[in-house]
Image (tube, rainbow, N blue to C red):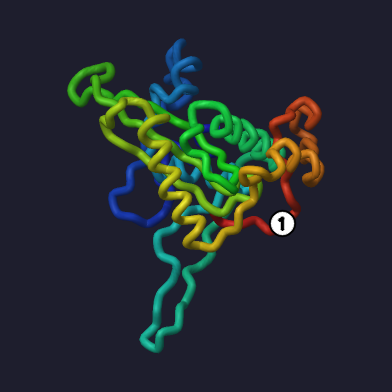
Amino acid sequence: MLNRYGYGRPTGVGFPGESAGVTLPYDQWYETSLATIPIGQGIAVTPLQMAMVYATIANDGVQVQPRLVRGVVQPDGALTPAPPSPSRRVVSPFVAAQVRGMLVGVVEDGTGTRAQIPGYLVAGKTGTARVPNLHARGYSTNLITTFVGLAPADDARLVTLVQLYNPTPRVAAATAAPVFKQIMQYSLAHLGIAPTAPLPGGPSIGEMRAHALPKPKPSPTASPSPAATPAVLPTKSKTPKQP
């Protein structure tokens, strides 16, 4: 799954010197790897790789290769768009919706409450990473705090990642999450993306979900049923977008 999401290799964005990150082949994992890798130790990823994973979850499980150049402006002022980026399915829409529901829970009443944006359903996750030593095994006392998320979570348009080196205080909930909120709130307004979640005095998120579209059905290969996952956000039938 790490490889399917794009960890361990360059994203193909075309930026010179892009790092592939570090992921050990499975046959080189230690006995402790099953416990450490899920919490982020034993692997190294770039911010762009991490943002691409969240964009995949936002895009109903379809990963679109990121790019820096939107197009080329010709001498006459006309824009020639860049070729479409290749895409591939990583997980089913049902699994992507499950993950979005979990990430909404983090922002609603978990460690990401300071990333909440009035009028928008936000999905995201805090992260606090220890920085490895450069010349010895193990980790240093330095920290990187991260918040990465997407909005609106029920019809995702944007993914934003904030990463801070040795901030004070040394927790992502109090440092990266508020910065994420400022950037995402400005971006939503700048792009004219209308609110999708309840404002103060309006219906609750639970009431909105109760009247939303039916929850997604599991694919033939998915084992859980929608009834067993109350946090699943409904997915809409729509053309894949590129957040």
Q: Quadrant of the C terminus?
A: bottom right
Q: Residue lying at the far bottom in this picture: please name it.
A: 76
Q: Residue at x 57, y 59 (%)?
A: 193
Q: Which residue is mark 1?
A: 238
Position of 18 compared to 202: left or right? left
Res. 73 image quadrant:
bottom left
Q: Residue at x 79, y 46 (%)?
A: 213
Between 204 and 8, the one lying in front of the other is 204
143 over 210 or under it: above or below: above
Type of amino acid under label 1: Lys
Q: State the image coordinates of residue 162 (x, y, percent, origin top left).
A: 38, 41
Res. 178 image quadrant:
top left
Q: State the image coordinates of residue 151 (x, y, percent, origin top left).
A: 56, 47
Q: State the image coordinates of residue 43 (x, y, percent, origin top left).
A: 39, 27
Secondary structure of the residue carrying numbered label 1: loop
Between 25 and 146, the one lying in front of the other is 146
35 over 184 or under it: above or below: above
Position of 97 compared to 159: left or right? right
Q: State the image coordinates of residue 231 (x, y, percent, origin top left).
A: 69, 31
Q: Residue at x 42, y 20 (%)?
A: 28
152 over 34 or under it: above or below: below
Visible in this render: residue 60? Answer: no
152 over 165 or under it: above or below: below
Position of 127 compared to 233: left or right? left
Q: Residue lying at the far top in this picture: please name it.
A: 31
Q: Quadrant of the N terminus?
A: top right
Between 37 and 115, the one lying in front of the other is 115
Q: Residue at x 69, y 39 (%)?
A: 204
